[in-house]
Image (cartoon, helix red, strand yellow):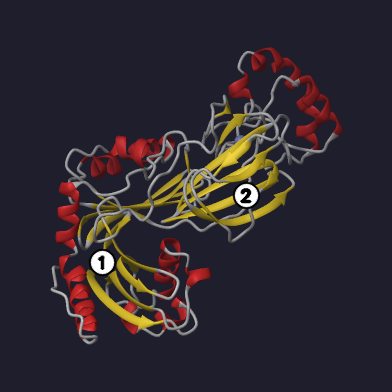
Amino acid sequence: MTESTATTRTSRPPLLRAMVPALAAAIALASWWWAPSGDAALMTDRALLGLIEDSDLYAVDVDPAPTVWEHYTIAQGDSLANLWTNQWQLPEAALYTLLNDPRSADILRQVSPGQHLEWRADGEGRLLALRLWTDPSKGWEWNLRSGQLHRTALTYERNLHQVAVRGEIRTSLSAALAEMPSLGGRAQAIAAEMGELLPLASKARKGDRFSLLVDLEYIDDAEGAYAARLAGFDYEGEQISVRAARFDDDRFYTPEGKSLLPGFRRTPFNSEYRISSPFNLHRHHPITGRVTPHLGTDFAMPVGTRVLAPAKGVVRTVSYHPLAGRFVVIDHGQGYQTRYLHLQKAQVRPGQEVKPGDVIALSGNTGRSTGSHLHYELRLNGRPLNPMTASLPSRERLQADELRRFQNQYAAYFDLHEQENATAVAGNGNRRDNAG
Ligand SMILES: [Zn+2]
């Protein structure tokens, strides 16, 4: 992250001075290359380059979260290039690396609707692996390690099936799920998904009842499930009662089509502030040539500016880091997380629930920062996204056509529960018709 060899340090000041005019002409671009160090010579150069007002010039993962495999089913009209850069926000460089291999280019050119893609990136947005299933049991896997591409043919016997499990909380959901063999050893992953959807850490109570619909994938004759994904859930508890299922867009909706994650503002403040340093996963250090990603968007703003929650969520972390300064991390559910660095003061506590527009902090200039600004990060499943261009959950509910499709998809699941509820109510002499 920082240069530490004596050679680099002694050779740097003349180089920096030579570059000052060029940098001054391109402040927005220049703000990223400063490698932080307490070194006295570097401080002199920092003063020289006082024009550069922003500079969290390092990739600091203040609160690392594991990244997960992302899934996508190719739809009619999809273009890989468009999905890659716009929808998934993966670095173009990785796509070029793939397409530079003629055989890989050939395979990827023939991607067709209905085929399934899976990919995984690291906490700095770099692609680690990609899988393409050309049919349910055959496909290709590409692994990228330090820029090197490895291609493997996949020939698994894949079995996909859906299971429904139900139970009651005694200590925690994960403990309850751990006792269920039908989950193929994937109880922890399912409990984690549920934890993203509902604030179970604080609101689950003994005696709460749940029923889950889970998609499981087995390959070859392996004992445990290869992958598991929550498709739907019905949670009835003392503090929370929610029923929802996963739709095409990978987000969860209630049977009436109401989104569990509505309304996500583009920026976490009122008014407008200049972007002093944009999100950039592959910016290069002009001297070392190393990639030093900028994982968020920097907004130049006066110290003390009110920072607002862009969506509802639960505060995960409030802490201090020598580089990031005072920082706040908020979980918004369904894998979405936002982070706020270089704050003057946090106005929230870990575990606190926030609504859109709630004041969460005052912006500042703390940590390794040379000018007052807010560094704002948006992450999905641990992976940094460009907060200014990412597709944000914004719709409150499914529209007519979508709602019909969604309700058809889960008719059996939703109906089953309607019937059970009706039966339960009937026991109280209060029967109502099962409308479905
Ligand atoms: Zn920044």
Q: Is 122 displayed left or right of 29 in the figure?
A: left
Q: Quadrant of ligand 1?
A: top right
Dividing the picture into quadrants, the one containing residue 53 is top right
Q: Secondary structure at mark 2?
A: strand
Residue 346 vs residue 380, the one in the foreground: 346
The reply to whether discs 1 and 2 touch (Cβ–Cβ < 8 Å) is: no
Q: Residue tagged by mark 2?
A: 328
> Image point 62% across, 37% down: which residue?
306
Q: Earlier in the sequence, mark 1 or mark 2?
A: 1
- On residue 156, which mark appears? 1
Look at discs 1 and 2 and give the one toward the viewer: 2
* Quarter of the picture holding the C terminus: bottom left
Q: Position of residue 220 (x, y in %)?
A: 27, 73
In the displayed structure image, the side of residue 313 where residue 28 appears, left or right = right
Q: Residue at x 47, y 82 (%)?
A: 206
- Residue occupying the point 43% across, 81% down: 169
Question: Residue 178, image x and y in percent?
Answer: 42, 81
Separation of residues labelled 1 and 2 (CA atoms): 43 Å
Pinpoint residue 112: horizontal percent, then vertical percent. Answer: 18, 45
Q: Count up the numbered dots.
A: 2
The circle on residue 69 is none
Residue 100 visible in image: no
